[in-house]
Image (cartoon, grey):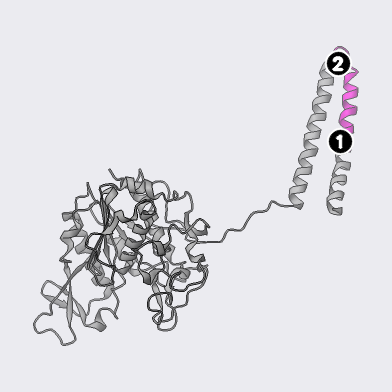
């Protein structure tokens, strides 16, 4: 208080000198003949201006001594990305805390795998589910399940890929179910339970004539038999120039979302006896990224020739950052908060190949480049809170969680005026 008082009176003391000089100047001027009303007005104007100056000085002095309080918002994010939506790059942003999240309760959604329901599996903190993605120069409209269901009425949405694709499929179903009054109207068409190995699942929202399907195709291209005279270590081949045999079932759709990448590793291919084949030729020494690129070239050609781009909106989601650590990358530690740095996980050779291939395509395909944004979410993995806690998991994500954000961005692209709108 002493500091504030000294500032106020010192300021007023200096100001009072000029204030009195102004009035005395006005008094001298008023003595002139025939212009009394002009100088009185001048005197009044000068006094008013001086008062405003004084109050402004007081205000700036107060702001200097007591700066405005700004709440600190924790955010973790990226500074640039590749995919933009209209005038706003929706993937250029940061994660911010939002107590209105999550968008659903996985325990109330029969299509959320128990293995991904971390809270039901014993995780005590739920902070990982209370982060939303905030683009830098715009915002993602709050998810409205009923409105989205109306937009998707009569459509067929198809997810194709590995278990990360299945997680996004489950997420979207759970998100949309919050807008359905009678939950019995939502069911798997064949009465099947969700399992890791099943190749086809279809959930129908009967009130909206909407089907949301998942096809398990971890490589997108076709496995094949071992050629004659192949080395003994070759147990199976991956035909890089042939699409998966079930690809015909994906064509009749309104939205197609692809992913691939997590199975393109030495441990899941070479160490299991899987090798690459093009035509009749085995490619035993072909690098993984080269093989992935050839497989995606086959996929791109299939999309260009088989998919009706006037009807079907096609998306490809990039590699989802995992957070394994340790010398052999076999340690899984899940913190309570997102990482403050990407630690190099914002880049991926798999994602680079996806982006490169899509750029060369002659039909519109939207890349959902989630690799950078996922890099910060080490807090949101399944960890030991799965249906098999003895095997930690730093690849898959808890539900609700990060896959919900993928779907928010997917829907933003679908429904945007500048994207590929649903008719």
Cα distance, mark 2 to mark 1? Answer: 22 Å
The foreground one among 257 and 205 is 205
Q: Earlier in the sequence, mark 2 or mark 1?
A: 1
* Quarter of the image that includes the C terminus: top left
Front in this rendered view, residue 410 or 213: 213
Q: Which residue is mark 2?
A: 36
Tell me, yes or no, whether the two marked residues, 2 and 1, touch with CB atoms within 8 Å.
no
Measured as percent of width and height from the top left, residue 330 is found at 40, 81
Q: Residue at x 91, y 18 (%)?
A: 31
Q: Residues within 10 Å of mark 1 (few under 14, many from 20)?
A: few
**The quarter of the displayed image where residue 189 is located:** bottom left
What label sits on residue 18 in the rendered view?
Answer: 1
Q: Is residue 85 magenta?
A: no
* Element class at badge 1: helix
Q: Can residue 368 be seen from the camera position used here?
A: no
Q: Farthest residue in the top direction?
A: 34
385 versus 28 height, above or below: below
Judged left or right of residue 156, residue 144 is: right
Q: Is residue 104 left or right of residue 365?
A: right
Magenta: main secondary structure equals helix
Q: Is residue 360 above or below residue 270?
A: above
Report if residue 27 lies within the magenta region.
yes
Q: Is residue 48 visible?
A: yes
Range of magenta residues: 16-36
Residue 79 in percent (x, y) is at 47, 59
**In the image, is 339 to the left or to the right of 52?**
left
């Amino acid at each position: 208080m002493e500091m504030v008082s000294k500032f106020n009176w010192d300021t007023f003391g200096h100001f009072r000198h000029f204030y009195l000089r102004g009035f005395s100047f006005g008094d001298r001027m008023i003595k002139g003949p025939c212009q009394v009303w002009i100088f009185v007005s001048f005197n009044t104007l000068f006094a008013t201006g001086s008062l405003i100056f004084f109050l402004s000085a007081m205000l700036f002095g107060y702001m200097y001594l007591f700066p405005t309080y700004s709440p600190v918002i924790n955010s973790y994010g990226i500074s640039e990305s590749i995919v933009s939506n209209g005038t706003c790059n929706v993937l250029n942003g940061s994660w911010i805390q939002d107590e209105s999240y999550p968008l659903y309760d996985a325990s109330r959604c029969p299509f959320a795998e128990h293995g991904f329901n971390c809270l039901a599996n014993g995780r005590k903190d739920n902070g990982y589910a209370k982060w939303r993605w905030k683009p830098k120069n715009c915002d993602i409209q709050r998810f409205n399940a009923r409105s989205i269901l109306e937009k998707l009425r009569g459509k067929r949405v198809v997810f194709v890929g590995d278990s990360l694709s299945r997680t996004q499929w489950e997420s979207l179903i759970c998100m949309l179910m919050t807008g359905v009054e009678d939950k019995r109207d939502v069911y798997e068409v064949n009465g099947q339970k969700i399992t890791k190995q099943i190749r086809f699942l279809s959930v129908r929202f009967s009130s909206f004539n909407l089907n949301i399907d998942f096809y398990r195709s971890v490589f997108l291209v076709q496995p094949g038999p071992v050629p004659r005279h192949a080395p003994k270590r070759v147990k199976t081949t991956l035909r890089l120039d042939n699409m998966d045999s079930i690809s015909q079932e994906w064509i009749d759709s309104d939205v197609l979302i692809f992913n691939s990448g997590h199975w393109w590793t030495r441990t899941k291919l070479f160490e299991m006896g899987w090798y690459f084949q093009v035509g009749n030729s085995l490619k035993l020494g072909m690098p993984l990224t080269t093989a992935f690129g050839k497989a995606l070239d086959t996929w791109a050609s299939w999309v260009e020739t088989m998919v009706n781009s006037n009807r079907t909106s096609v998306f490809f989601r990039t590699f989802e950052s995992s957070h394994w650590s340790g010398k052999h990358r076999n340690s899984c530690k899940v913190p309570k908060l997102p990482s403050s740095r990407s630690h190099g996980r914002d880049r991926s050779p798999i994602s680079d190949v996806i982006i490169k291939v899509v750029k060369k395509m002659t039909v519109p395909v939207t890349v959902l480049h989630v690799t950078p944004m996922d890099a910060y979410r080490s807090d949101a993995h399944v960890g030991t809170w799965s249906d098999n806690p003895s095997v930690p998991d730093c690849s898959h994500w808890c539900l609700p969680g990060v896959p919900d954000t993928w779907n928010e961005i997917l829907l933003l692209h679908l429904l945007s005026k500048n994207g590929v709108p649903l008719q």
